[in-house]
Amino acid sequence: MKPFSLLFLRVSIALLVLLWGIDKVVDTDHAIAVSDNFYLGLLSFPGLMPILGILQSVVALLALVGLFRVVVDPLILLINLGSLAGVWRSILDPWGWFLEGTNVLFFPSLVIAAGCLVLIAFQGQETLVMDAKRRAA
């Protein structure tokens, strides 16, 4: 059961990051709006978004198949921590009782970050990944 649970966690997190990466490439205006709204516009450069999207998509695809996990899993965690930082108000006050601009739908960002930590913690126990297949060969 553990191998399939870890694989499901890996695939679901990687697909989320892949969707975010693809969004940066195919809908740059949306990605810039997200950057403006949640990240103080730090990444709001039209020429930069597709490059970041491609890089993010490559990292997500490597995570999806479980290649180079020692490097890729922490990168996935950093990407998700960046997302978590962008919605921190919704983590502290999901219903907006004290902080403005919150949304309970962003609260799962905390769960996603925890899932990333689980993948890092159990790297040595994952068997349904390409790294394990390469090691066995």
Image (cartoon, grey):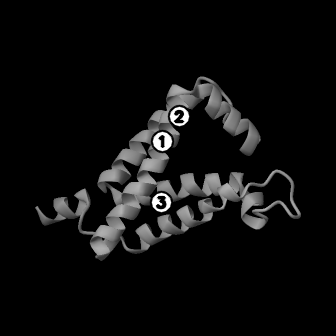
Mark 3 or mark 1, which is nearer the start of the sequence? 1
Give the label on residue 19, or none. 1
Residue at the spot x=57%, y=30% of the render?
49
Asked if marks 1 and 2 touch (Cβ < 8 Å), the reply is yes
Question: Left or right of 38: which side holds 100?
Answer: right
Asked if marks 3 and 2 touch (Cβ < 8 Å), the reply is no
Quadrant containing the N terminus is bottom left
Tell me: residue 60, above or below residue 41: below
Q: Which residue is mark 3?
A: 74
Question: Left or right of 14: which side holds 128?
Answer: left
Expressed as whole percent of the image width and height from the top left, the position of residue 86 reads: 70, 51
Question: Left or right of 97: which side holds 14?
Answer: left
Please identify the residue farthest to the left as the structure is shown. Answer: 137
Q: Nearer the viewer, residue 128 or 46?
A: 128
Question: Left or right of 52: which side holds 35?
Answer: right
Residue at the spot x=22%, y=64% of the render?
132
Expressed as whole percent of the image width and height from the top left, the position of residue 42 reads: 71, 38
Tell me: residue 12, above or below residue 24: below
**Residue 41 visible (yes or no):** no
Tell me: residue 63, above or below residue 43: below
